Each structure stands twice: as C-alpha cells, then as structure tokens.
Amino acid sequence: MAILNRYGSRMHLILGLFVAFALIVSGSIACQQAEEVVAEEQAAMEEGVLVFEGTPKLAIGNFLFLPEAQGFDIMVFGAVDGGDLASLVDQEVKIEGEIAAQQASVMIANTIEVKEANGEYRGVFTRTEEPALDEYLGLQARDGFEALDKLKYDDNAGWEGRETAKVYGSLEELENGYRILVLDDEGKQVGYVPVDSISDYANFYLQKLSLFDKFWFYVELKETIAWNTRRRTSELFRADVIFAGLF
C-alpha cells in the first residue's frame, strides 16, 4: 500500500508538472500572438492606415457615415462598383483608409469591401481620385466664424460687412427652398435667413444629427434683404450654408 501511495503521489506530481508546463507554453503563445497583433496595429497607425468594419448609415456626396468609425468623417473619392456611394448604406463593409493631411478627423477611404452572404468580403471600391477637401470645414477654420447672436431686422449693421458668420436656429423647408429661423440666446425668434444653397457637408451633418432640430449654421453671407421686404418678413440676409453643427 505504501508503494502504491508513493507511486500515486509521483504520478500526481508528474501530471501537475505537465499541466503547469502546458499552461506556460500556451500562455507564452497567447502573449506572443497578442504582441504580434499589437505590433501590427501600431505599425498601421504609424503609417496612418485605418481599418473599420461596420454598417454605413448615411451617404451624401463624398461623405460616408460609419457609426463604428467614431470621431472620423469618411470621405470617398471615386466610383463604387455596382452603384453609387449610397448603395453601401445598411450593408456590412470593411473600409481601409488613411488620415487626411492637415485634417486629423477626416479618413480618406482607399479601399472598401462588402461582406457577402457566405461571410467573404468582395472589393467594390479602390480610390482612383485625389482627395479634394474643399467643402470640409475643420475645427480650426470654424473658429473664424463669429456668432451673430444679437440680430435685429431693423439693424443691418449686425451683419453687413461680414463675409462669413454663424447663426443659431432651425432649418425650415419652404415650397421653393429653405430658410433658417434664427433664435437668440434665450430661444426667441429674431428673424429669418433665406438659404440659397446647402453644401453636401452641411447636409451630411444635418442628417447625421437628425435627433436634433436646432443647430449652429455656418454661412457665407450674401446680399442684405431690401428694407421694405425685411420690415414685412423679418428676413435679414441671404446666405449659403457650408456647415451645420451643435456648437
């Protein structure tokens, strides 16, 4: 019996050492694999390469909204196989791109793949055009738009002489276009700004932020509305909307 106990103890010891060795080896392999993944991600980031997988929810002009790519506006330049950019909405995609020079919040898509029913990805886009960020208005540029928060229809000095500014309010659709209902800092109506055009970038954000109904509208000011019309309609000046946001 004593011999069996010694034999059993020896077997338990050997088995325990084997398990410990296996755990050490598997742990080492797992750490090595994790280090390789981290190294690949760091190398990609150093090269400015970004990869996102998800489901686009909005496409306007060159802009694509992918919720999984938080903090980035994705821009696509070139043709998408089988349709336009809007054909990617609500499909599972993988997007590889790079951060735009001078615009850290813009990702320029280089390739886009769509996930098929069998789980495989199929390429539908490879960038063929040089990025053009003419419509994009970065944070630094927005700082140059002074808020017009004390407007009065009978005091055109509040806006004349300015080329750009921002006004707070809501967008109203008319039979023949749009206008901005301008509000003061207490939420009271102070007048209207007839809108001649809305850029794709502004429209992109208006729809991206569809849960909200009041925005700061970044505008290029145009001609002042004639006094007789201004007095009757409270319309202040005409404008082109180039961006709309919450601040």
Image (cartoon, rainbow, N blue to C red):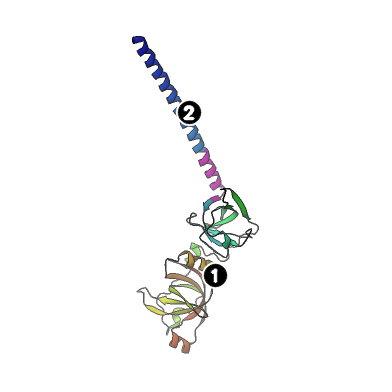
Residue 203 position within the rendered picture, expressed as x and y whole percent measured from the top left:
51, 68
Specify the principal SS of the magenta part: helix
Whether residue 47 appears in magenta in the rendering, the answer is yes
Classed neighbour count for the residue bearing mark 1: other residues with Cα under 10 Å, few (<14), some (14–19), many (≥20)? some
Q: Is residue 227 left or right of residue 133?
A: left
Residue 241 position within the rendered picture, expressed as x and y whole percent measured from the top left:
51, 72
Classed neighbour count for the residue bearing mark 2: other residues with Cα under 10 Å, few (<14), some (14–19), many (≥20)? few
* Cα gap from disc 1 to disc 2, whole angstroms: 58 Å
Q: Earlier in the sequence, mark 1 or mark 2?
A: 2
Q: Nearer the viewer, residue 144 or 187?
A: 187
Quarter of the C terminus within the rendering: bottom left
Q: Is residue 202 left or right of residue 11?
A: right
Amino acid type indicated by mark 2? Val
Position above or below: 96 against 134: above
Residue 245 position within the rendered picture, expressed as x and y whole percent measured from the top left:
45, 66
Residue 79 position within the rendered picture, expressed as x and y whole percent measured from the top left:
64, 60
Q: Which residue is mark 2?
A: 25
Residue ranking furthest to the bottom: 228
Quarter of the N terminus within the rendering: top left
Q: Nearer the viewer, residue 28 or 131?
A: 28
Position above or below: 100 against 36: below
Q: Is residue 64 left or right of residue 235?
A: right
- Badge number at residue 199: 1
Q: Nearer the viewer, residue 194 or 82?
A: 82
Which of discs 1 and 2 lies nearer the camera? The answer is: 2
Q: Secondary structure at mark 1?
A: loop
Can residue 247 be seen by looking at this rendering?
A: no
Amino acid type indicated by mark 1? Ser
Range drawn in magenta: 36-51
